[in-house]
Image (spheres, helix red, strand yellow):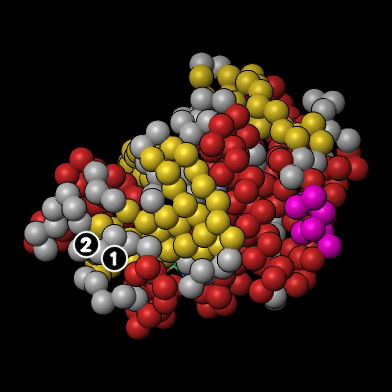
Amino acid sequence: MKTLHIHGRAGRSTLIVGETLSRLDQYTPKRRTVIITDPVVNDRYGDRFPDWPVIEIGVGEGSKTLQTVSDIYGRLIEMEADRSTWIVGIGGGIVCDVAGFAASTYMRGVGFGFVPTTLLAQVDASVGGKNGVNFLGYKNMVGTFNQPEFVICDTGMLKTLTGPDLLCGFAEIVKHGAIADPALFQFIEDSWREALALDPSTIERMVYDSIVVKSGIVNEDEQERGVRRKLNFGHTFGHAVEKIAGVRHGEAVSVGMAVASLLSVKKGYLAREEAKRIIHLLEKIGLPTRLAVDPQSAMDALKRDKKREGDRIRFVLLKRIGEAVVEDIRITDLDEALHDLARE
Ligand SMILES: NC(=O)c1ccc[n+]([C@@H]2O[C@H](COP(=O)([O-])OP(=O)(O)OC[C@H]3O[C@@H](n4cnc5c(N)ncnc54)[C@H](O)[C@@H]3O)[C@@H](O)[C@H]2O)c1
Ligand SMILES: [Zn+2]
């Protein structure tokens, strides 16, 4: 078992890798606690939850809305939850985002923690204190920065994930290696087969190293004013792909990382060999690096991106594997590059 900390504005967050769901009650204060989860997680793991009231939210992005948050407030009021009530989100990124937002806003904020149950939630969504929901079709448009008091990563729970959900988490792990940790990147290249088979020591190291990267960056820049933007590697284009092609987040990010790597080569930053290493690794793992997305609709979606400022869009490029730079790219340059890449 390994522990890490994030020192947020509103307090310290403790991240524990290798702990089990069964010991969850050791981590909450001896006060009233309410669990927020989804029906899939509740069906599989509900019998191992501590004996606390459970609020179920729906499955999928369609449930990551203010309506769901409003339903949660209603249930909390029915339960007579007050400011001393605690909330624990047990589930994937959607449960963590919704539970974190509801906990951060109910009665101006109650204490909360997460037990992330997907690989993506363990290495990414539950770490860093961003909580939020989608609004009018815009992803993560409404939300807060607020750290959970604890995050418990039980890698044993990953065994019940579907193949595609597991793969999506690997996209974020590759991202963490690519932007900040060449040794992690090399480890994934050497051990991706064991990782996909969820060999316990391999997956625990990858989850832990990933969280080290993310929490290190968040400790430097909790509110995403500078260095934290590096975590968006693959996400600018990825979000556009996710929107128009309707693919999973991790799959879209994988395509986005391939595009950003090729764009980094085009800008003269990254050696072509290194871009190939990234693309090959994603392909070996089984993640997509190309999608039949029409560049024009990708551009239209990109123009609605909240990271756009005027005629420029913020893009994360690589100088080498393990080092990222954030640049404002002219939308017209990006447009040209995307058309070029579509022909490549
Ligand atoms: N807040 C952040 O910083 C941040 C970062 C990255 C992603 N996200 C968000 O995370 C969301 C995606 O998260 P996700 O990929 O975990 O999706 P998800 O929460 O939809 O989970 C995927 C599916 O797996 C099921 N599931 C969860 N745990 C399981 C388990 N152990 N066994 C079997 N099935 C299980 C869920 O019920 C769901 O059907 C997106 O909305 C994204 O915006 C947030
Ligand atoms: Zn992501």
- Kindly identify the residue that appears in the image at 29 percent across and 51 percent down: 111
Between 10 and 43, which is closer to the camera in this rendering? 10
Q: Secondary structure at mark 1?
A: strand
Say if 183 sits above or below 197 in the image: above
- By secondary structure, the bulk of the magenta-drawn segment is best described as helix
In the image, taking residue 287 as reference, residue 116 lies left or right, namely: left
Quadrant in which residue 331 is drawn: top right
Q: Secondary structure at mark 2?
A: loop
What is the distance, in whole Å, between disc 1 and disc 2 at their CAs? Answer: 13 Å
Q: Is residue 68 magenta?
A: no
- Kindly identify the residue that appears in the image at 24 percent across and 44 percent down: 109
Residue annotated with mark 2: 31
- Kindly identify the residue that appears in the image at 66 percent across and 23 percent down: 327
Between 6 and 141, which is closer to the camera in this rendering? 6
- Kindly identify the residue that appears in the image at 56 percent across and 62 percent down: 17
Q: Amino acid at mark 2?
A: Arg
Q: Say if residue 237 shows up in the picture.
A: no
Callout 2: few (<14), some (14-19), or many (20+) C-alpha neighbours within 10 Å? few
Residue 140 placement (x, y as % from top left)? 41, 42
Residue 117 placement (x, y as % from top left)? 48, 66
In the image, taking residue 266 as reference, residue 243 lies left or right, namely: left
Start and end of the magenta stretch?
183-190
Callout 1: few (<14), some (14-19), or many (20+) C-alpha neighbours within 10 Å? many
Residue 250 placement (x, y as % from top left)? 59, 54
Quadrant in which residue 40 is drawn: bottom left
Residue 269 placement (x, y as % from top left)? 82, 28
Residue annotated with mark 1: 35
Q: Amino acid at mark 1?
A: Ile
Say if 337 sits above or below 218 in the image: above
